[in-house]
């Protein structure tokens, strides 16, 4: 196999290692990832024929989501996750397996793009594409997370790679259309932009493009409706309901509104680091990359018209930005042996920018790992409540746990739950009196004190970043010692509370709380 045709190389392995490191350091997940993660759990441990036990029937969310991505990831993870479960491993091991498997799939899709960049622009550009991506925070951190945007990238990366390689127009049409119909209806913007380029470059005619586009939409729609109607227990097209919710009902603004320039002035600089200004230099330094930049700019520009904005909405085009920046890096690298201080200074500035970006990524990753106090609190509960669980099992009674809104949104998932006698409830809107009446033995809550309960432990969460010293001289000394000039501050976020049945239990709980605080 020719070197340019290889799918995986050492650079791909670097990206895979970075993605795996992020997944291992921060294995828990947040509410945005919840639907797909809970669906993967239920598919693995209940099976697709026992839908009545699935989480989404009790907590359907604001809009329905497709099961097709969860089915694919569960099928890929099952050969590792199920034997671990049968051997008695905690389901948290299964969570890590799922994260690593999804990370492997998304890295493989990035490898398709890497190969397309190598074939079109050269080996140096392909290496720079992966290096730029690996040193950033957002893409490597999220490539193993079960967001619909990430699942859509499995198709958009493959579709963009086929578009870049310049062969048949059919793979980009079918892959990008499937991503829009099944996973993210906003990918229609990407379909339209790439489709316009295919027409403008005469790789496809209007009639053929429209006919194949309609066929791709029809096939994707049929697959989604067939599978998702089974799991949701009603006829539906999930992304159709999302589209109706966000456009006809115009409800997305209820989650916050950002100014029109936010993607360009905040999101892209944070997500891309040095790749952002590098990509903007492409029209001057690498004309062949202009179509890529045009699609990337067009997507972000069109998306800026919507008030509700999040960085993750840009995930499918971030690889395009990195590919364009990589072309500029290749031009600078190829000119390194030419005389002139300006060229050497540019390379030195590039190296410094990449180093600064890597340092920022390490700091952001360390801070983000402290953003899942709910997951840590649930693990603490199982450790501190082991004796209670043994006693409850001997008595044949359940040990009931109520999980509040904050812990449910910040790390708690079904992967963290244990079997009987543990029984979990995420019932919302309960008053203190109602929680007492329900007879919950333990509470996971953001309230440090609840009448009738004693605090066993508190799980810390991220608070803020602070400078390790105030004076420039002191900061310089810290840097010279090889230490970080900033500190990550945490504070108690989620509390583990135990019901007080007797005075003796109250004393025991108080002692446990003191021990946990000392630890």
Image: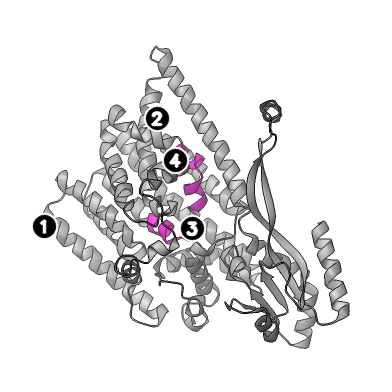
Q: Which x, y percent locates residue 14?
A: 51, 41
Q: Which residue is mark 2?
A: 329
- Sequence-wise, the earlier of marks 3 and 4 is 3
The quadrant of the rendering that contains the C terminus is: bottom right
Mark 4–mark 1 distance (CA, rounded to whole Å): 40 Å
Quarter of the rendering containing residue 4: top left
Q: Is residue 401 within the magenta segment?
A: no
Examine the rendering and report whether any part of residue 8 can be seen.
no
Q: Which residue is mark 3?
A: 102
- Sequence-wise, the earlier of marks 4 and 1 is 1
Q: Secondary structure at mark 2?
A: helix
Mark 2–mark 4 distance (CA, rounded to whole Å): 17 Å
Magenta region, residue range: 130-154
Q: Nearer the viewer, mark 2 or mark 4?
A: 4
Main SS of the magenta part reads: helix
Q: Which x, y percent locates residue 467?
A: 66, 38
- Please tell me how crowded label 2 is: few (under 14), some (14-19), or many (20+) other residues with Cα within 10 Å: many
């Amino acid at each position: 196999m020719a070197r340019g045709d290889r799918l995986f190389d050492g650079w791909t392995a670097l990206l895979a290692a970075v993605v795996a490191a992020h997944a291992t350091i921060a294995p828990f997940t947040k509410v945005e990832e919840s639907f797909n993660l809970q669906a993967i759990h239920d598919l693995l441990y209940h099976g697709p024929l026992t839908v009545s036990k699935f989480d989404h029937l009790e907590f359907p969310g604001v809009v329905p989501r497709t099961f097709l991505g969860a089915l694919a990831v569960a099928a890929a993870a099952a050969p590792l996750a199920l034997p671990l479960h049968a051997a008695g491993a905690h389901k948290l091991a299964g969570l890590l397996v799922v994260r690593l498997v999804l990370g492997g799939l998304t890295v493989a899709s990035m490898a398709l793009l890497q190969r397309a960049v190598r074939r079109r622009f050269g080996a140096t550009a392909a290496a720079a594409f992966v290096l730029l991506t690996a040193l950033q925070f957002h893409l490597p951190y999220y490539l193993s997370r079960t967001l619909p945007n990430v699942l859509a990238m499995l198709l958009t990366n493959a579709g963009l790679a086929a578009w870049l390689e310049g062969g048949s127009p059919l793979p980009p049409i079918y892959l990008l259309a499937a991503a829009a119909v099944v996973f993210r209806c906003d990918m229609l913007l990407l379909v339209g932009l790439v489709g316009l380029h295919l027409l403008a470059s005469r790789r496809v005619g209007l009639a053929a493009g429209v006919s194949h586009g309609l066929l791709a939409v029809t096939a994707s729609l049929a697959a989604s409706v067939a599978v998702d109607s089974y799991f949701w227990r009603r006829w539906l097209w999930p992304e159709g309901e999302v589209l109706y919710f966000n456009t006809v009902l115009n409800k997305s603004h209820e989650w916050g509104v950002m100014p029109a320039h936010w993607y360009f002035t905040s999101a892209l600089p944070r997500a891309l680091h040095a790749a952002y200004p590098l990509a903007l230099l492409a029209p001057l330094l690498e004309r062949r990359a202009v179509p890529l930049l045009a699609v990337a700019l067009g997507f972000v520009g069109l998306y800026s018209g919507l008030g509700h904005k999040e960085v993750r909405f840009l995930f499918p085009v971030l690889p395009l930005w990195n590919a364009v920046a990589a072309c500029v890096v290749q031009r600078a690298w190829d000119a390194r042996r030419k005389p002139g201080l300006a060229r050497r200074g540019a390379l030195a500035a590039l190296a410094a920018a990449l180093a600064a970006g890597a340092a920022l990524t390490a700091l952001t990753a360390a801070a983000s790992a402290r953003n899942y106090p709910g997951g840590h609190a649930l693990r603490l509960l199982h450790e501190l409540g082991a004796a209670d669980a043994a006693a409850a099992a001997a008595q044949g009674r359940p040990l009931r746990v109520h999980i509040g809104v904050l812990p449910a949104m910040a790390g708690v998932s079904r992967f963290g739950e244990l079997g009987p006698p543990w029984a979990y409830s995420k019932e919302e809107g309960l008053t203190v009196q109602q929680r007492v009446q329900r007879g919950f033995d333990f509470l996971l809550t953001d309230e440090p004190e609840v009448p009738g309960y004693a605090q066993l432990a508190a799980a810390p969460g991220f608070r803020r970043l602070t400078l390790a010293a105030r004076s420039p001289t002191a900061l310089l000394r810290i840097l010279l010692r090889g230490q970080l000039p900033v500190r990550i501050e945490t504070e108690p976020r989620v509390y583990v509370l135990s019901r007080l049945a007797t005075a003796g239990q109250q004393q025991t709980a108080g002692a446990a709380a003191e021990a946990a605080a000392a630890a």
